[in-house]
Image (cartoon, helix red, strand yellow):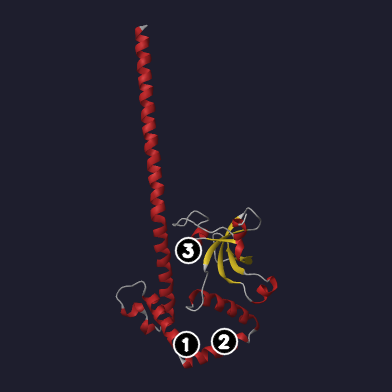
Amino acid sequence: MKDNQVRQRAKNIKRIRLERERAVFMKLGAKLRAYFFTGILVTAPVAITFYVAYKVIVFVDGAVNRLLPPQYNFDSFLPVTVPGLGLIVLIVGLIAVGMFAAGFLGKFFLHLGEWIVYKLPFVSSIYSVLKQIFETFFSGKAQAFRKVVLLEYPRKGIWILGFVSSDTKGEVKGLLKKKMLNIFIPTTPNPTSGFLIFVPEEDVIELDMTVEEGIKFVISGGLVEPGSPVSGKLPRKKQNK
């Protein structure tokens, strides 16, 4: 009888020891798995960014190399391939074009070229849209999105993020007879596409986040939250209630 009790006790001790060892290995595996995914989250954005930047530089270098005469090819007078030379040449070339376009002769040819383009039926529409987009984002005189706002859309109780481009003016303002805002509603994960709506100023909540933080928020689908807390102001009609 005692022998059976001793054997049973030994089995229980062995079972408890195996369970403890299994629990330790499971905790260790969970920690290693967590460290592995943390390593991916830390290194993947940096690695992908450098990879894309490298591919862009190599593509620009190859394109510039093909445009240059053979005697000025980078590989002809350099012992090794240096990434980025084509990008430098492209930047210098764009600066030179900008300097020429800013002069009297450059403005003359620029206006002449635009006059010819605007006479072409289909090409003129594409050129006009592209010119407005590039002037919005690259011109020092033009302003891009001014601020980030929240508004209820497409119905009450559902909120959406929008970017204020400007105050509504012209015919639309004359018809609506109240102060409206031009608000661009971006799509996720591509914020360059979306649609334009006109909203009364009192119906939006202005956020403290910057436009850059708002764009990151949209691209990530809400995963990358803004760093600063939101202290937006409620719409006036809500404050009156």
Is residue 185 found left or right of 223 in the rendered image? right
Is residue 141 found left or right of 154 in the rendered image? left
* Residue on which the image places disc 3: 210
Q: Which SS class for mark 2?
A: helix
Mark 3 and mark 2 lie on one chain; the one further toward the N terminus is: 2
Locate residue 71, reporting x and y percent.
36, 84
Front residue of 240 and 34: 240
Tell me the kind of residue under disc 1.
Ala
Residue 91, relative to residue 155: is it above or below?
Answer: below
Q: Which SS class for mark 3?
A: loop
Q: Which SS class for mark 1?
A: helix
Tell me the kind of residue under disc 2.
Glu
Q: Which mark is residue 114?
A: 2
Tell me the kind of residue under disc 3.
Thr
Give how far apart the Cα atoms at labels 3 and 2 are.
36 Å
Front residue of 144 and 16: 144
* Residue on which the image places disc 1: 101
Few, some or many C-alpha atoms within 10 Å of disc 2 (few <14, some 14-19, many ≥20)? some
Looking at this view, name the residue that lies furthest to the left: 79
Marks 1 and 2: CB-CB under 8 Å? no
Locate residue 121, reporting x and y percent.
65, 83
- Residue at 31% across, 80% down: 77
- Residue at 39% across, 27% down: 19
Locate residue 99, reporting x and y percent.
43, 86
Is residue 91 found left or right of 188 in the rendered image? left
Residue 91, relative to residue 203: is it above or below?
Answer: below
Q: Quadrant of residue 29?
A: top left
- Residue at 59% across, 56% down: 239
Front residue of 87 and 233: 233
Q: Quadrant of residue 150?
A: bottom right
